[in-house]
Image (tube, rainbow, N blue to C red):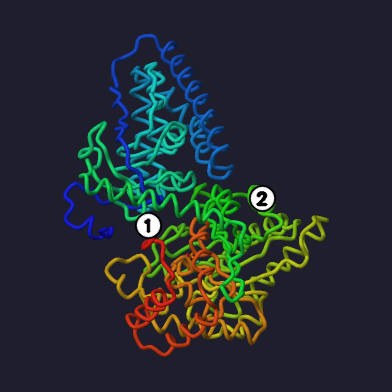
Amino acid sequence: MKSFKEIYRGAENKIAGIGAAPGIIIGEAYLYTKEKLQISNKDVEDIEKAKYDLTEAIAKSKKELTKIFAVAREMMGEVRALIFEAQLMILDDPILLNEIVRRIETEKKSPEYIVDDEISKYQSKMVLSHESYMKERALDIEDIKQRIIRNLQKRRWESKIDHNVVVVSETLTPADTILLSRNKVLAFVTDHGGLTSHAAIISRSLNIPAVVGTHNSTNQIKDGDEVVVDGFYGYVIIKPTEEQKAFFSDKRKRLLKLQKELEELKDKKAVTKDGKEIKLYANVDVSGEIDVVVTSGANGIGLYRSEQILNELGEFPSEDEQTTIYSKLSSRIYPKSITIRVFDIGGDKFRFLDFQEPNPFLGLRGVRLLLENPSMLKTQLRAILKASVNKNIKLMLPMVSTIEEIRETKKIFEECKKELRNEKIKFDRDIQVGIMIEVPAAAVMAKEFAHEVDFLSIGTNDLIQYLMAVDRGNDLVSKLYQEFSPVILRTLKNIVSAARKAKKPVSLCGEMAADTLAMPLLIGLGLESLSLSPSTIPYAKRIIRSCDYKKAKRLSDKCLLLPTEVEIKETIEKFFTKNKITRTRQII
Ligand code: PEP
Ligand code: MG
């Protein structure tokens, strides 16, 4: 049997995109094109009737969106569904609506023409923005605009599909994705959009395989074509050959079989063959993932990236709104625990500053930015405290590079506790505070830092970037982003020893924990707690259960003496072969 690489090499019927949600699907393509609405700019004589039609169309659009909002809430949870609430708010915006009415009265043009013109003005401002988030929001507004115009023209959109299909579309708005996924959608393929596009996020939450950002799928794929969608590697194959079809059917069968086997591990512990238990926690980015966490058999949530709320909402939620979000998470995961990381803003994440920093990764990011904006930090800390009554919340600080930052934050945290006591509001008085070790300074000083806090969590995504001086998102230097570099191994070893000396627990929550090749090494280095994306937990558990701790320890001791990444990786691969441990890609 050929490998994935071999099957893709030279295949002329493939389209490359971004694997946005994992899975393999073979199915019939359904070209989802929204009919381009023709906009009439004819003059209107009856102004009152035009205004009445507008009010009716807005009311109808509202009704439709309210329905979609309710469905979304059910399918994706409160926070994720808020995008639709934001769309509803546009329909209630008095400035926008008054301006449309004013222009109908003065210009005497058809409402659809004025609606199109007025809302397009908003959109062009957003498209010009450098923020990918704002560009995505421009798409949401397109959805609203088309909805009102369609209702003015009294037309309907069809989103009912009566048989299993792969939806292929230029773009998908959040509403499209939700509505289509209620039908028989096997997978999504889009021309545009990246990993942060809503189609991608929603597909992941709903477990529907997706390939996005393919540029021209809608030109190359015809309605009814048979296609293969590979959400692991990010490829779409049009009209697969017999050989390709046999290959992917086989992969799919193996994947389903593997997933079934993994399901059986759900309630089993992640223990090595010689009895050492490794606690596996989940990293959570969107609240909709909580259901996956619950079914993945995780020991709790080891990293909740709270800045994701800002990405979803596009603004800072109030103390009450944050309290509601954190309380819901805490209750949903109870009696297990959740570690909430305060907003890690800056770098390549949610931008807060109006100006572009020359070196954002070395700039005002994480705890640095929060300490510069104490009121924002206090709002979040108060909300976390208020939500802590179940006593299962821990607090974590990102991007710490000095002891002063820890002390300063803890001082503010104590102030918040004092305020709540005065206000007679209950909270967990023993709430633990930990830090991320993701900056070389913190790694070097790990023992001293550990004395200041209750726990440490190693963020290898950033730690590798800062130790190797490589931008984690830059393709040009991706060869130097070496997870298995001796530099990383030795640094991890030092952090684990430092935590031990300080008698504080240490965990690892970077993507490295989800790399099955790294698993024996991490166990061998002495890590007893890992946090990884929920869908990868069963895969990690399988590897741990087929490993022997003593052998893993010998492996890591050996690797710690090697001078290059190549030699380290070869040694680990030999370990897998010698101990007959198979990795997912080899199985499927
Ligand atoms: C990390 O840096 O490893 C980490 C877990 O944080 P993030 O990926 O959110 O920066
Ligand atoms: Mg980080």
Apparent side of residue 10 relative to residue 385 in the rendered image (left or right): left
Q: Quadrant of residue 527?
A: bottom right
305, above or below 569, in the image: above
Precedes in sequence: disc 2 or disc 1: 2
Residue located at (44% from left, 28% from top): 99
Question: Does residue 300 appear to the left or right of 75 in the view shown?
Answer: right
Q: Quadrant of the N terminus?
A: bottom left
> Could you say where residue 71 lies in the image, as x and y percent from the top left?
54, 33
Residue at the top extreme, as displayed? 46
Query: Disc 1 on helix, strand or loop?
Result: loop
Pick whichever, 481 or 361, lies toward us.
481
Q: Distance between the residues labelled 2 and 1?
A: 33 Å
Q: Mark 1 points at which residue?
A: 588
- Residue 567, located in which quarter of the rendered image? bottom left
Disc 2 beta carbon < 8 A from ligand 1?
A: no
Front residue of 398/368: it is 398
Q: Which mark is residue 182?
A: none
* Residue 124: percent from left, percent from top: 33, 41
Residue 565 x, y percent position in the rendering: 35, 81
Residue 332 numbered mark, or none: 2
The three-letter amino acid code for the residue at tag 1 is: Ile
* Nearer mark to the viewer, of 2 and 1: 1
Q: Do the residues labelled 2 and 1 touch (CB within 8 Å)?
A: no
Q: What count of labels does the image hold?
A: 2
Q: What element carries label 2?
A: helix
Q: 113 and 552: which one is in front?
A: 552
Q: Is residue 61 above or below residue 238?
A: above
Q: In the rendered structure, which amino acid carries the disc numbered 2? A: Arg
